[in-house]
Amino acid sequence: MVNIPVFAPAIGEDTKEHIGRALDVGWLGMGAFTKEFEDRIASFLGLRGRYVVATNTGTSALHLALRAAGVGPGDEVITPSFNYVAGHQAVRMTGADVVMCDIRDDDLGIDVESAAECITRRTKAIMPLHFAGVPCHIEDVYALAKARNLRVVEDACQAFGSSVVGGKIGSFGDLAAFSFDPVKVVTCIDGGCVITPTQSWQEGLQRRRFLGVDKETVVRYANQRAWDYDVVCEGYRYHLNNIMASVGISQLKRAQEFISSRRSVCRAYSAAFERLPGVRVPATDFQGVSPFIYCLRVLDGRRTALMGHLYDHGIECGIHFVPVHKHTEFAGARRSDMRVTDKVVTEVLTLPLHSNMRMDFVDRVIKGVSSFFSPVKEYAVR
Ligand SMILES: *Cc1c(COP(=O)(O)O)cnc(C)c1O
């Protein structure tokens, strides 16, 4: 019996063909495929009057977005502790201080009241996370930002393709950053992008993405190089190369299929677990959600026992996340009360979720979890 991994890449012949064609072009660096990938992202997200800047990782997208929001030394950025550490490190990279707030008990997104309590004269921006692909209470975040004159950088790394009433995440609002890393719903193997609301910021981001060089974007998008150029600002080496972009293009063509298949699995899980005593299923029907992970909450301190039981059944699971305020490097950062976060992080358990997941895997996960909570029924079935 093979183990069921938490994540599994959805790389088919189509992706291999795209990579092969990109290699045959013979232009390995940032180029025409980078531009095509950005154009396809814009059309997939339904962008109007908003602009895409592709990057080599989601972390660099977050860093660039924070810089575009004007975040720098002396500033503070408020973000939940309940997140992967990439956003927090990106804040550090700007020279600003990260301030951590609590989350809501339902969608595990930012608790806007807790964020409001953290605001000081130094606060420059709020960085909410759409956890697991489930949109947070983003309207409340924008209302707070407007009232207190703050910028918003959405950590949308887990929410590519998710939408709220106003449209897909990234298609409205201030700045958003996506990740296309190896385990994300759409992958470039490694990649990311920033969405900006103005063309002049797009141009600024393009220069910062490429060492502050003024001409690189336009020339390289034609698979060429400029030999006379100027360096006009601080910059990094954050561009997305043609080969990784070609992987992203192949994946984007199948994004809707990936999202729909993941949604079906999430709904099957929730239907199976909803009435189990001792767990809480995600507070969503997955309508409009592009599910990155399926997060089950295991109550009464039984998570470790359930993990052991699943492991015995060849089912791997994960924990998202260790809260950032518990990490050595961030223990001294200013933060709010972490009542909800400190409880939630003892409960969350990530079950296997793949695009086009094998039905026998789905069945095994459902039986594995159910048999832990109602062993008698399971034996009766056998
Ligand atoms: C994946 C992810 C990142 C980092 O993206 P990379 O592309 O791996 O750099 C940041 N934040 C969150 C919430 C993520 O899920």
Image: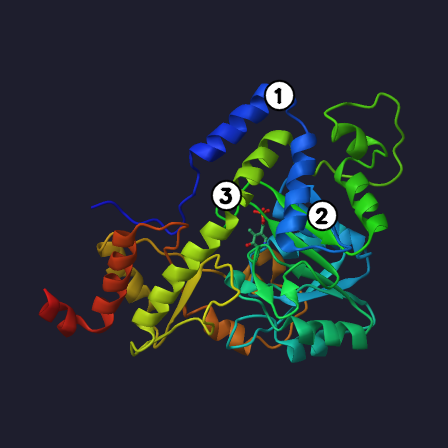
Label 1, residues with CA under 10 Å away: few <14, some 14-19, many ≥20: few
Query: Please, what is the three-letter code of the amino acid marked with disc 2?
Result: Val
Q: Is residue 182 left or right of residue 47?
A: left
Residue at mark 1: 25
Q: Secondary structure at mark 1?
A: helix
Label 3, residues with CA under 10 Å away: few <14, some 14-19, many ≥20: some
Q: Earlier in the sequence, mark 2 or mark 1?
A: 1
Residue 299 versus residue 324 in the image, above or below: below
How far apart are the alpha carbons under marks 2 and 1? 24 Å
At a point 71% along the width and 52% down the height, the residue shown is 195
Judge depth for marks 1 and 3 and give the one in front. Answer: 1
Query: Please, what is the three-letter code of the amino acid marked with disc 1?
Result: Val
Quadrant in which the C terminus is drawn: bottom left
Q: Is residue 127 left or right of residue 83?
A: right
Question: Count the marks: how many?
Answer: 3
How far apart are the alpha carbons under marks 1 and 3? 24 Å
Q: Is mark 3 within 8 Å of ligand 1?
A: yes
User: Residue 182: which disc?
Assistant: 3
At a point 40% along the width and 51% down the height, the residue shown is 354
Residue 245 location (% of width, % of height): 61, 36
Query: Please, what is the three-letter code of the amino acid marked with disc 3?
Result: Pro
Residue 324 location (% of width, % of height): 57, 61
Q: Is residue 379 left or right of residue 325?
A: left
Q: Are marks 2 and 1 in contact (CB under 8 Å)?
A: no
Residue at mark 2: 52
Residue 62 location (% of width, % of height): 68, 52
Q: Is residue 112 visible in this depiction of the protein?
A: yes
